[in-house]
Image (cartoon, coloured by chain):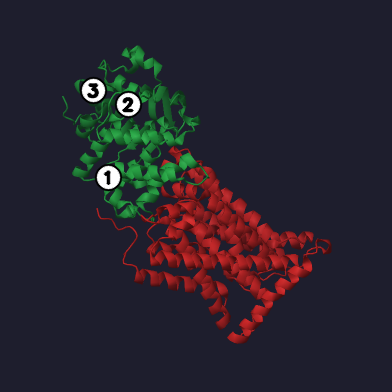
Chain colours: A green, B red
Amino acid sequence: MSEHMNGVRRAITGVLSADSSPDSRVGSITDREQPADGSTQHSAGRTSVETTVKPVIDIDDVTFAYGEKTAVENISMSVEQGDFLGLIGPNGSGKTTLLHLMLGLQRPDSGSIELFGEPAEAFEDGERIGYVAQRSTDRGGTMPITVREAVTMGRFAHVGHSRLSENDYEIVDEAIETVDIADLADRQINQLSGGQRQRAFIARALASEADLLALDEPTVGVDAESRDQFYGLLDDLNTQGISIILIEHDIDILTKHVNKIACINKELYHHGDTVSFLESEALAEAYGAAHGVVEHDHS
Amino acid sequence: MSLDTKRSDDGESVARATGGLGWFVAGSKRERLEFAGIVATAALAVAMIGFILFDWLRFAPGWTGVGPLADMLFGQFLIVGEWMDFYLGTNVFQHPFMWRALATGVLIGVVAPLVGTYLVHRQMALIGETLAHTAFAGVAIGLLFIAVTGWDGSLLLVALVVSALGAIGLQKLTERTNTYGDVPIAIMLSGSFAVGTLLISWGRDFASMAVDIEGFLFGSLSIVSPEGAQMVAVLSVAVVAVIAITYKQLLFITFDEQAARVARLNVDRYNTLLIVMTAVVVVGAMQILGVILVAAMLVIPVATASQLSQSFRETLYLSVLFGQAAILGGLAFSIGASLPPGGSIVVVAIGFYVLAIAVSDRTGSSITMH
């Protein structure tokens, strides 16, 4: 349990050496750092190294509709261990739906999704996923609750109905220190700024020792400086092998931090590394399909 | 309960070793005061459960042999009551009915704010009122059933079943609409009350219904029957136990339902649990507070506590304390002024709320520094 956190701490302080954590994650980092083929067809050019490591998420020909309204259509892609995947697309393009499908919050109408090798809707290891939603979904604005209480929730999936142990509290403390909000731990969540708040939620995900972070537009309403810090933190976490899926509207920010991009507008327009995405026409096509006007200026 | 939320450096290990209550051990003066209040409340609640138990056991079958002992202990409460009457110049505490009302009130003062803390912060405050109206329909159904069949079961038991079923129905309804929108709630609230009034009027035409409807509507001290008090005692123990066991899960779901789903908590099951507990508490509280005022006990102490607390755990403790203060203050006022207990309790509770707003330096709980 805490070896993982120790790993996190070590890496944060920049001591990530080859022999420090001989677990599968190091392997996956190495995989990721192999030059990707830059192809837009996701698993087409994967090397044989990766067949030994199961993808974190494997989506196979998934379609989902709200009643008559199709949200995502025929999407196939996978998220590998160590990926920092940016999910972009115009408003209403099904990004959040796809994220919810990936996390097993919704069931696909057709196709299948595997989460850590199990069908997503039957996946039970809730503590392996950390989820940070847009600011509006939690009750932190009106509810008296301290930062420490919120972060401690990350341990709830581990302990079930039994008591939290000494070890659980240590993990919570470490998580709070990792995201650098130790001085705010006994403050109420609603006294925090937007950026500090989202850090607290990241701490909750770290406390659950998640292998996968899913973030749905985490920095809406957060000032630019805090946002940069926040993404810096995500970069650090990713460096230690935590896979991250991020929905973010700001393409400049996104391309600066992520190493893979999936561009969707109901269908998948592109999935591959960031460089190949910028070179492709995927963005224009995806946004063009929604609006008929391409306003973005990426060439 | 097992979540320590606040720890000072030196008391850390002590606090952990002693579990939930340890939160107070090395704490500030305020925390010690709260701790003392909780201990006093718990002692009072245990004494009241004792009274209800003795009241129950004194009619135990002869072969058990506990009857005479229970009767003797029961008598002790009445003797205490006589002394209280003597010093206070009243003529109420020596009567068993007053002790039953008092016991029911004290227990409701514990469990209603406990359940209410989750309801209020899930923005489900009106659920309590709705379920009270459903329970009223349950009372009507029970009255009719008893009048027609001559069954000698408990009216409150019927109300409890109907209210719990109504709670589950409401839950299913809101799950389908995928939100606790207030439309299904408003429909259920007025609908069940309508059914209740129709049943009572219709039933009066062909059967005699010897029950004080006004007592159920506005609450009354004399309406609390031995069975009613026993039911409240059993339910209180059950609700406190369930909340102690599911504190963490209910907190997670209350705070961030989406993240709780991702963490693979069975959100729907806990929602149902919470709403059924609410139904149970409402039926118990209905006897004293009345159908119309019952929601107040779920909401006002919690609002008062939220105004003053830092953490969620503190909110839970403070709301129980304010709930208890409102019950005791309200009953005292009610007895002193010979007015209905429901209104008295609610007015006292609101008094505390106004005071809390005046005292607290927050203009609202949603201040941000952003």
> Mark 3 touching mark 2, by CB under 8 A?
no
Q: Callout 1 environment at 10 Å: few (<14), some (14 to 19), or many (20+)?
A: some
Question: Tag 2: Cα neighbours inside 10 Å, few (<14), some, or many (≥20)?
Answer: many
Frontmost residue, B333 versus A230: A230
Residue at (30, 28) in percent of width and height = A85
Task: Using the image, tell me which numbered label, if any, was put on residue B131.
Answer: none
Quadrant of the image occupied by residue B121: bottom left
| Chain letter behind tag 3 | A
| Residue occupying image coordinates x 44% and y 55% | B15
Label 1 marks which chain's residue?
A
Chain to which the residue tagged by mark 2 belongs: A
Residue carrying label 3: A277
- Corner quadrant of residue A268: top left
Between label 2 and label 1, give the one nearer the viewer.
Answer: 1
Q: Residue B259 at what x, y percent from top left?
A: 41, 41
The answer to whether marks 3 and 1 mark residues whose Cβ atoms lie closer than 8 Å is: no
Left or right of A46, for residue A277: left
Q: Residue beneath label 2, please?
A: A82
Q: Distance between the residues labelled 2 and 1?
A: 23 Å
Q: Do the residues at pointers 3 and 2 share their chain?
A: yes
Q: Is residue B242 visible?
A: yes
Three-letter residue code for mark 2 = Gly
> At 77% across and 62% down in the image, what residue appears?
B152
The residue that disc 1 covers is A180
Image position of B317 with respect to A274: above or below: below
Q: Real-space Cα distance between discs 3 and 2?
A: 19 Å
